[in-house]
Amino acid sequence: MPSTLALIHTSPVLVPMFTALAKQFLPGTRVFHMVDESLIANTIRAGSLQKDTVRRIAAQIDSAHQAGADAVMLTCSSIGAAVPVARQLFDFPILRIDERLAAEAVSKGPRIGVLATLNTTLAPTVALVQATAAELGKPVEITAHLCQGAFEAVIAGDVATHDAAVAAGLQHLAQASDVIVLAQASMARVIDAMGASLPALPILSSPALAMEQARQVLDGLA
C-alpha cells in the first residue's frame, strides 16, 4: 500500500503549489489537502497562536490520521508552534513546514535574515531559527524584516504590490545577511519572478525543503 500524506493549509492558494511539489517529491504517494482559513484569520486577529486554535489544529490532525494519513504536515508557519503540542498527543509523524528550512538556514549562517508579510509568521519563524541554532550549538545573528502592506495587498488581489514589497525586503536584508529565509510558503514564487535582480546569496523557502523532509519521513515508515 502506498503511503499517505495529509497537508493542512490555512489558504486554498497553496493547494496547487503543494500538489505540484507532491508529484515532484512524492511520486506514488497519496496526498490529500485540508483547508481551514479560519485558523490563520483567528491567529491574525489575536496577534498570536491561541490555545483554542491549537486545540482545533490537533483535532484536524487527528481527523487527517483517521482519514488514512500516515503523516500530517502543517503548511502555515503562523500555526507551526502547534506541532510540538500535537507530537505529545499522537504517535504518527507530524511535520512543520519550516522545520527543515530553519536547519538549512542555520547551516548557512551566522547572519540570517528572516522575511515575512505577517508578524504572526515573522515572530514564530525567528523563534524557530533561534531554537534550532541553540539546539545545534551554533551562534547566529538574526535580522527580521516585515513587508508592510504586502499581506493586505495580496488578500485584496494586488499581487504586484505584494511581490514588489517582498522584492524590496529581499534587497534590504541582503545588505547584512549570509542567508535569507522566506517565512511564508506563498512568498516562494517571488524568487523566480525577480530573475537577474535576485540578491546573490542563498534565499531559502520552505515548500520544497519540507516536501523533501516528508519523503524521507515516509520512506522511513515503509
Image: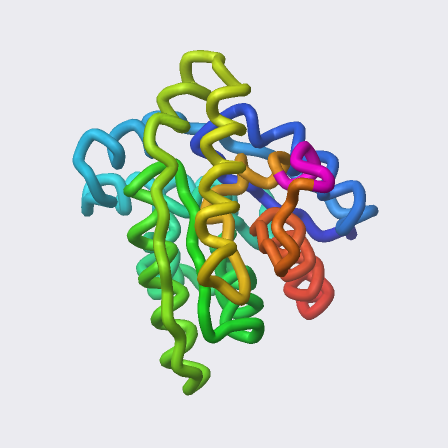
Residue 67 can be seen, yes or no? no
Which is nearer the eye, 163 or 121?
A: 163
- Tell me the magenta residue range: 191-196
Query: Residue at horizontal 44%, vertical 58%?
Result: 113
Q: How is the image coloured?
A: rainbow
Q: Is residue 217 left or right of residue 120?
A: right
Q: Is residue 20 left or right of residue 163?
A: right
Q: Quadrant of residue 189?
A: top right
Which is nearer the eye, 190 or 37?
A: 190
Query: Residue at horizontal 36%, vertical 80%?
Result: 134
Query: Residue at horizontal 51%, vertical 72%?
Result: 109
Query: Residue at horizontal 54%, vertical 62%?
Result: 179
| Above or below 203: residue 160 | above
Which is nearer the eye, 66 or 196?
A: 196
Q: Is residue 119 left or right of residue 92?
A: left
Assess whether residue 194 is covered by the magenta stretch. Answer: yes
User: Is most of the magenta stretch helix, strand or loop?
Assistant: helix
Residue at the extreme bottom: 137
Residue at the extreme front: 175
Question: How many numbered marks does the figure carry?
Answer: 0
| Above or below 9: residue 155 | above
Q: Quick one: quadrant of the C terminus? A: bottom right
Residue 146 can be seen, yes or no? yes
Q: Looking at the picture, how far across and down is residue 169, in whole percent?
A: 45, 42
Q: Looking at the picture, how far across and down is residue 98, in whole percent?
A: 49, 55
Q: Looking at the picture, how far across and down is residue 2, in whole percent?
A: 77, 51
Assess whether residue 222 is covered by the magenta stretch. Answer: no
| Above or below 97: residue 185 | above
Q: Quadrant of residue 220?
A: bottom right
Q: Looking at the picture, how far across and down is residue 163, in whole percent?
A: 53, 28
